Amino acid sequence: MKKSLKEIRDVFPLNFDINFLNHGSFGSCPSPVFDAYQNWQRELEKEPIQFILYQGMDELKRSRQVLSDFIQCDPMDIVYVPNPTTAMNIVIRSLPLSAGDEILSTDQEYGAIDKVWDYYCERSGAVMKRQPISLPMVSKEIVLEQFWAGLTPKTKYVFLSEITSTTALIYPVKEICEKARSLGLTTIIDGAHVTGHIPFSIREMQADVYTGTCHKWLLSPKGSSYLYASPAMQKIIDPLVISWGYKSAKPSGSDFQDYFTFNGTRDFSAYLCTPEAIQFRTDYHWEEACRACRQLAKDSHKEICDTLESYPLSPLTDEFIGQIVSFPIKTKDPERLKDVLYKEYGIEIPVMVNRDQFYLRVSYMPYNNEKNIEHLINSLRDIKRKSNLLG
């Protein structure tokens, strides 16, 4: 039976006095999953030695198996990491970058990962080529044409987000990986906003490297993400921390697993909650609830655009948008706008920037409804009447 809005809200610890329209940044963990998280922490503190060295390792293996089934890959090809930024640091610093090597990317990537690439490109002399992708997006074919226009004989790697952080657009990553593979290029994909959000299969995509979060759309506790690497890439990826996994006394048969599974004392309880997070989706009919969210995103799009005097960044189809939608806005003080929305109107929502263009990004979740969107629209109208923050 479908869960009501009240039933869904009752299991999220969010303060619903605030209109929370920013699930995309850090997610929100429902109470059944958070309870499991705290239970694992209690188990850890009850018997730290047995948990860290034995029980926890067994549970970690089980959790990894459940996650691999969900994202469709071999469990030996994924390891847990705290976040995608950590994953990308692990990967990028391991690449044999040389002067003149080119990394083909887009001009809509996440700022933190852009900085990682810039750091290692400056050290190696490699070139990060951020190919301009025109907005609004019109078709997948045009996106692919614009992206591959950046290909040169010096291109060695392809890097991009499957769903962009700022513009919230879905890229045709499967097609990009397919062509890259035919050209002998290595593909590195940032899927921070994908797992638990849109249909997804690593096996079908066949990226060489993929990183995703469990703590955003999969609803796990904070600090739970994963790194996938193909068997070929595992041979060149070094750990950030050298520890007991190097020349392990109890080898698993995979250096990749040994290097990243145990690298010092830490609380890995968040990693163990994937089974509960996936079970929550079943118990709360999450797929059905999220379909309604995607429909609300489409139904409310025109009114939000009209209010902001804005325009769609793409066709309003599942090919381009999911449960996060960005709206281009005109503002001279984005930080002040965000502050006013929160402090004066009780709306938690990000104001983001890319290429000198500001965006208001709305997340649509099953704990939201039409009233949340109506409040956002009315608040934006009020701000336009009372100030020069918009328009």
Image: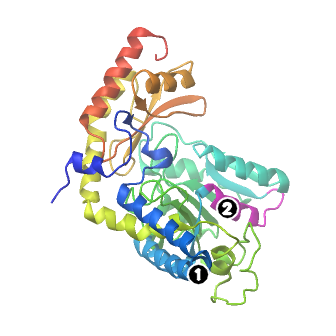
Residue reaching furthest to the left:
1
Circles 1 and 2: CB atoms closer than 8 Å: no
Disc tally is: 2
Q: Secondary structure at mark 1?
A: helix
Against 48, is 313 above or below? above
Against 104, is 342 above or below? above
Between the residue at mark 1 and the residue at mark 2, the CA separation in whole angstroms equals 43 Å
Badge 1 density bin: few <14, some 14–19, many ≥20, Cα 10 Å: few
Give the percent coordinates (x, y) of residue 251: 67, 89
The answer to whether 274 appears left or right of 369 in the picture is right
Viewer-proximal residue, 22 or 262? 262
Amino acid on which the number 1 mark rests in the picture: Gln
The range drawn in magenta is 85-100
Against 301, is 120 above or below? below
Question: What residue sits right under mark 1 in the picture?
Answer: 50
Give the percent coordinates (x, y) of residue 116: 71, 52
